[in-house]
Amino acid sequence: MATVDPRQISDLFDTIAPRYDQLNDLLSLGLHRLWKRQALLWLRPSPGQRLLDLCCGTGDLALLLASRVRPGGLVLGLDAAAAPLAIAQRRAERQPWLPLQWQQGDALATGLADGWADGAVMAYGLRNLADPAAGLAELRRLLRAGARAVVLDFNRPDSASAPATFQRFYLRRLVVPAARAVGLPDQYAWLEESLARFPTGPVQEELACAAGFAAARHRPLAGGLMGLLELQA
Ligand SMILES: C[S@@+](CC[C@H](N)C(=O)[O-])C[C@H]1O[C@@H](n2cnc3c(N)ncnc32)[C@H](O)[C@@H]1O
């Protein structure tokens, strides 16, 4: 996939949706749950807030956030692909007291009003967008002044560094073989491909400032394998 075709991306996530949560747990040894909780430390969700989970997938973060904004708040989970959203909705139905809404749509053009959100998260989504800079601009547009947002994704360490060597080993020797075992090798090969075109942490900070964020700080997580972009509108 040379350039990113949004239709192909959403087909890809429709295909992997039934295995997505299982593979996430297996391939991160469950650590993705910890990284997602770490992302929320910056966001500091609180009761009454209206929050967004962009590229929500099967809803991990939206569900976590929804338990923090009660009473009086709301979390909207948005994703372009129907299959992960359907899983998110089924998970939410098991906790009907959580204030959750779901929307199928494009994170680059959500259709929501300016300043709609008191905060937002995007986990493993920005890397999949056709234009990450435009994704950050849409994220900024959706936040009220002063609101916080956090983007969690794979990090792009210097290619000669130890974290980069480990990351290549992890993606080629663990992720793709595991995905092959469940019939999804091509879909998971996209991970390394998308990472190669993903802006580095310092460039993400620059793009966020250019998109109008007042503050942007990228920090490596998990020994440099992952990265957190902490943003303030
Ligand atoms: C790797 S998954 C991450 C899911 C979830 N945030 C998580 O951390 O488990 C990426 C998600 O981004 C969604 N996505 C990709 N491009 C999108 C776009 N342009 N607009 C909205 N969602 C998109 C995919 O459908 C997929 O569910």
Image (spheres, rainbow, N blue to C red):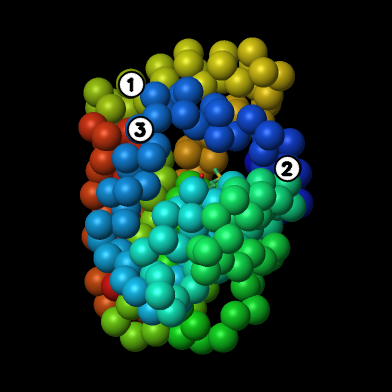
Q: Disc 3 vs disc 2: Cβ atoms closer than 8 Å?
A: no
Give percent across and percent down for residue 107.
59, 64
Of callouts 3 and 2, which one flags the residue occurring earlier in the amino acid sequence? 2
> 10 Å neighbourhood of mark 3: few (<14), some, or many (≥20)?
some
Of callouts 3 and 1, which one flags the residue occurring earlier in the amino acid sequence? 3
Of callouts 1 and 2, which one flags the residue occurring earlier in the amino acid sequence? 2
**Three-letter amino acid code at the position of disc 3:** Leu
Report the residue at 56% width, 16% height from top.
178
Is the shortest distance between ligand 1 and the CB of mark 2 under 8 Å? yes
Relative to 86, is 75 on the left or the right?
A: left
Q: Closer to the camera, 7 or 117?
A: 117
Give percent across and percent down for residue 87.
66, 46
Identify the residue under disc 2: 14
Report the residue at 70% width, 63% height from top.
104
Q: Closer to the camera, 181 or 156?
A: 181
Q: Is residue 67 above or below residue 117?
A: above
Identify the residue under disc 3: 31
Relative to 205, is 14 on the left or the right?
A: right
| Cα distance in 3D space between marks 3 and 2 | 23 Å
Relative to 181, is 223 on the left or the right?
A: left
Identify the residue under disc 1: 166
Residue 139 visible at all: no
Q: Disc 3 vs disc 1: Cβ atoms closer than 8 Å?
A: no
| Cα distance in 3D space between marks 1 and 2 | 29 Å
Q: Is residue 167 above or below residue 114?
A: above
Please name which of the two marks, 1 or 2, marks the residue nearer to the observer: 2
* Image quarter (top left, top right, bottom left or bottom right) of the N terminus: top right
User: Which element type, helix, strand or loop, lies under badge 1?
Assistant: helix
Relative to 203, is 52 on the left or the right?
A: right
